[in-house]
Amino acid sequence: MKTLILKGSVLALSLMLAWSCIKPDQTSTLTVSPVTISFSATAGEKTFTVKSTESWTVEKPADASWLTVYPDKFIAGTTPVTIQAQPLPSSSTRSAILTVRSSAGQTKDIYVEQQNILDPNAYLSFYGEVGSFVIVNPRDNNIMKFMINTNVPNWTPSVSEGDGDWLTYERVVDTLFVSVADIPSAAGRSGNIIASAGGSLQISVEISQLGLQEFGAPTADFVLSIPDSAGTELAFSKVYRNQARMTMLYIGASWCPDCHNFLPKVKELYEEFHPYGLNVYGVFLETEGDEEAYLNYIKENGLEDIDSATGKKIWWESRPVFTPPGPWPAVKENEFTRLFYGDALFTDEVSNYVPAFILVDNGGRIKKTFTANYRLRTEGEIFSLYHSLESYIERQLNCCQ
């Protein structure tokens, strides 16, 4: 009898021990709330809650860099998660799906959307009187300052696409310091500085830079001299400020047949309009080593002739620019030509070299340029250019009727 009781007790104890080693049925859980989050166009911050019996991570798609999630991983428990959205870069809605994944393999998706819905209390503007565009000079521009008036802390500045190589900014708190590089071409260019608080809440100002040959562009002053001739330095500014209503910068060369053919017409223009306020500054683009040929050309064409009655030169002052011989088109580019063409002669963006005629007012600002690729071999070709120059100068000086 005792043996039976003992055996029964051992069996019961074994069953109890075996039952105690079996784990109860534990179910992993993962919940996320809310599962849909909407942002307005301006930058914002919201939260969602993760409840999980396991550790978890947040998976974000590659195209959702506009969202920041913190923390993006955590241990089991109830965890508030912060999600931040950058300002909406355009008026188009954007969205992303975030996935919360537990270590047990369970997943929950969160749909995040940002729409062009503006906060009625948000504002963004420039301080002071800032127009829709600003005109700047071809070179040597001062840094411009634009102060931003806004209650949106995460506004973002930018430059119009393709213009970041010459139009740049530095942001200091709510002020933009804008720099404009010197222009390398005869034609102008424009770009936009943009401040965006999200979606259609943005402001911009167009920066329009005058080209080196555009109407109203200030010309760079230069000083040229005659080789081996002391005291012959002549500044361009001295010519256009010397009782001139208009000055023609005549760019030619002794080796250029078109220039030689048209030189008598330049003299005619000078004779006709100099009494009414037209000055001329001649610049001859020559090759190093040909200094004597240049001096002979000037002498042979009477450009150094003196009026016996007055003791003054009959014609205008001219000065040479000598460039080392080299391959084409590099030989066309020098410090002087860059003042009016930038890099355009070197890149062949502008094919004309000589002759060229640049007319400026008595402040040195561009009035008109005649810089086409002239071919002046026939009387008709010569007269056509002469007539265009004569008609323009006559209108500007309002004379000679």
Image (tube, grey):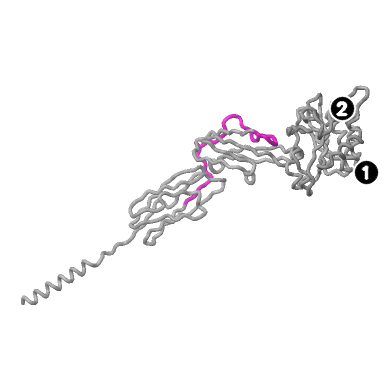
Q: CA distance from mark 2 to mark 1?
A: 27 Å
Mark sitting earlier along the chain (2/1): 2
Q: Quadrant of the N terminus?
A: bottom left
Mark 1 residue type: Thr
Horizontal and vertical percent for residue 44? 47, 43
Q: Which residues are drawn in magenta?
A: 112-141
Please tell me which residue is depicted at 11% across the width and 75% down the height of the picture: 7
Q: Quadrant of the C terminus?
A: top right
How many residues crowd mark 1 within 10 Å: few (<14), some (14–19), many (20+)? few
Magenta highlight on residue 379: no
Look at mark 1 in the image and give the residue it sits on: 378
How many residues crowd mark 2 within 10 Å: few (<14), some (14–19), many (20+)? some
- Marks 2 and 1: CB-CB under 8 Å? no
Horizontal and vertical percent for residue 362? 78, 27
Does residue 249 appear in the picture of this structure?
Answer: no
Q: Nearer the viewer, residue 267 or 33?
A: 267
Please tell me whether mark 1 sits on a helix, a strand or a loop: loop
Please tell me which residue is depicted at 91% across the width and 22% down the height of the picture: 310
> In the drawing, what numbered circle is on residue 274?
2
Q: Nearer the viewer, residue 195 or 295?
A: 295
Horizontal and vertical percent for residue 157? 56, 41
The residue most toward the top is: 310
